[in-house]
Image (cartoon, rainbow, N blue to C red):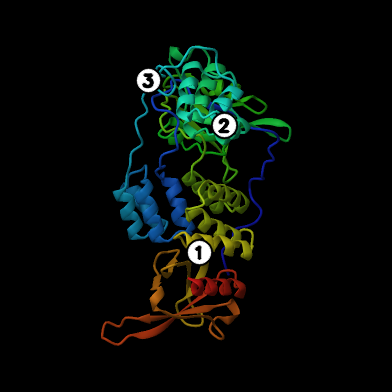
């Protein structure tokens, strides 16, 4: 009884030795400096994973759709897919109402990679790493240093260690993005970029894996060919047009990806979340730099974690969610998913409780996979997710046929069962119901944890009573 994430992941964790070298696969760079990534609309596959996982309540999913939008339209076929995934009517309506087409990617020829003409910058050689850090530490604003970078370029290639140094000295994501652009322009783009050659709009990094250089996707530009084709952060690039890239440096891989404008490049990748090998057909284009992320944003990380949880890869999900928590500890979603993964993936109830409390305190929910008694003594039941938040509790069956919601003020009792379903660790929530006839009455709703664990039921009871 129960659906649990298996601890054996399909993708083994990769030990990274030394700093990762980062290079951006761009050709014609468009207007706008690199900046914090804009909200990523859900694509269809990501949204289906969110619905199927059932680790967010219907209300939370609708709010996320309204905030981020979706990149696909609700055609009859797509509508049928979501209904087959048991998406409730509220979610389908939100998907229909929040279509946001990807921005048009158009070629341009700006005076600098960011599209801005530097102002009052004296001439001179490209800047070194130490010069940039010294300028920042001496009080020169990051925006002004960025103007120097755009006008004069840099004489080094950006990596994670240097990025940390620059950010610690007072740099911004925009400055780091400008440095990344200029280092690519100086060191990795062939001189034929003006002759009609284009790229896919992705950044890559090289890592040593078992002593061999491998190439991983670091990010994709918003609306870029790479993003539209489904390339994701963490995907390992195995082949380009049938040619292996194992052992090749990032600059070599970048040059293999580039090609004539409008031509097709085939990337064979190993997916980060599932370990599956797929070949993506990507049409090259001149890519703008606008809103290109310096790294993954919070939504990217939680999306990847949900995909990993769907693929029974809890270790990857947990590490990714911890990264999301570090990125923005004020938001509840990563804590909420982290508690779920720790409980059902690592079977660590103590860690799960810590994460769940953090989610609730930030306005989110603790989520448990449970069974709801339909027929008495669990002679018949449905399976689904039980949510606890500051306002009360709710339950959503996986098939969306049964839902339950009780405001905190209506909950009279929550307690372990001594008889009904006790062998399954069952508990009940006693709720005061409005009869509509002036006389309210109470009713018990019985649930059992998927793990049949009384410890899990006690955690549920403690969380309800705490908030």
Query: What residue is pinned by disc 2?
Result: 166
Crowdedness near tag 3: few (<14), some (14–19) or many (≥20) residues, C-alpha within 10 Å = some
Quick check: marks 2 and 3 in contact, CB under 8 Å? Answer: no
Determine the residue located farthest toward the bottom in the rendered image: 439
Determine the residue located farthest toward the right in the rendered image: 211
Whether residue 219 appears in this view of the structure is: yes
Residue 298 % position (x, y)? 49, 46
| Of residues 92 and 186, the one drawn nearer to the viewer in this rendering | 186
Where residue 57 sits, quadrant-wise, is bottom left
Whether residue 25 appears in this view of the structure is: no
Per the model, the C-alpha gap separating discs 1 and 3 is 48 Å
Query: What residue is pinned by disc 1?
Result: 366
Disc 2 on helix, strand or loop? Answer: helix
Residue 93 % position (x, y)? 31, 54
Crowdedness near tag 2: few (<14), some (14–19) or many (≥20) residues, C-alpha within 10 Å = many
Q: Is residue 84 above or below residue 371?
A: above
Q: Is residue 221 above or below residue 100?
A: above
Residue 420 % position (x, y)? 53, 84
Disc 1 on helix, strand or loop? Answer: strand
Per the model, the C-alpha gap separating discs 1 and 2 is 38 Å
Query: What residue is pinned by disc 3?
Result: 108
In the picture, the disc for residue 422 is none
- Badge 1 or badge 3: first in the primary sequence: 3
């Amino acid at each position: 009884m129960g659906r649990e994430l298996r601890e054996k992941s399909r993708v083994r964790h990769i030990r990274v030795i030394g700093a990762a070298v980062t290079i951006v696969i761009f050709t014609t760079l468009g207007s706008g400096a690199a900046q914090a990534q804009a909200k990523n609309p859900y694509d269809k596959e990501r949204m289906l994973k969110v619905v199927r996982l059932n680790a967010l309540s219907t209300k939370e999913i609708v709010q996320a759709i309204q905030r981020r939008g979706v990149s696909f339209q609700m055609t009859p076929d797509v509508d049928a897919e979501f209904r087959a995934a048991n998406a409730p009517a509220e979610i389908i309506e939100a998907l229909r109402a929040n279509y946001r087409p990807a921005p048009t990617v158009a070629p341009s020829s700006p005076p600098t990679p960011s599209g801005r003409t530097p102002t009052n910058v004296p001439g001179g050689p490209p800047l070194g790493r130490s010069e940039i850090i010294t300028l920042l530490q001496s009080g020169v604003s990051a925006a002004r240093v960025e103007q120097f970078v755009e006008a004069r370029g840099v004489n080094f290639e950006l990596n994670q260690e240097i990025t940390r140094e620059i950010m610690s000295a007072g740099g911004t994501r925009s400055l780091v993005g400008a440095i990344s652009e200029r280092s690519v322009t100086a060191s990795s783009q062939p001189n034929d970029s003006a002759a009609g050659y284009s790229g896919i709009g992705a950044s890559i990094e090289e890592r040593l894996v078992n002593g061999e250089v491998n190439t991983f996707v670091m990010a994709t530009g918003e609306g870029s060919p790479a993003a539209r084709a489904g390339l994701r952060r963490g995907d390992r690039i195995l082949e380009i047009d049938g040619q292996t890239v194992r052992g090749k440096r990032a600059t070599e891989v970048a040059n293999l990806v580039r090609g004539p404008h409008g031509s097709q490049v085939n990337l064979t990748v190993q997916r980060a979340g599932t370990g599956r090998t797929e070949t993506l057909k990507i049409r090259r284009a001149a890519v703008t730099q606008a809103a290109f992320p310096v790294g993954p944003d919070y939504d990217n990380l939680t999306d990847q974690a949900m995909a990993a949880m769907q693929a029974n890869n809890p270790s990857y999900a947990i590490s990714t969610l911890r990264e999301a928590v570090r990125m923005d500890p004020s938001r509840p979603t990563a804590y909420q998913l982290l508690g779920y993964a720790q409980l059902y993936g690592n079977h660590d109830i103590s860690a799960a409780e810590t994460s769940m409390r953090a989610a609730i305190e930030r306005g989110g929910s603790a989520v448990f996979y449970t069974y709801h008694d339909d027929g008495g003594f669990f002679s018949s039941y449905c399976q689904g997710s039980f949510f606890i938040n500051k306002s009360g509790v709710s339950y959503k069956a996986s098939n969306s046929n049964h839902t339950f919601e009780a405001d905190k003020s209506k909950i009279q009792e929550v307690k372990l069962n001594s008889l009904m379903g006790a062998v399954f660790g069952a508990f009940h929530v006693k709720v005061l119901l409005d009869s509509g006839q002036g006389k309210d009455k109470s009713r018990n709703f019985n649930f059992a944890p998927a793990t049949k664990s009384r410890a899990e039921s006690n955690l549920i009871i403690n969380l309800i009573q705490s908030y």
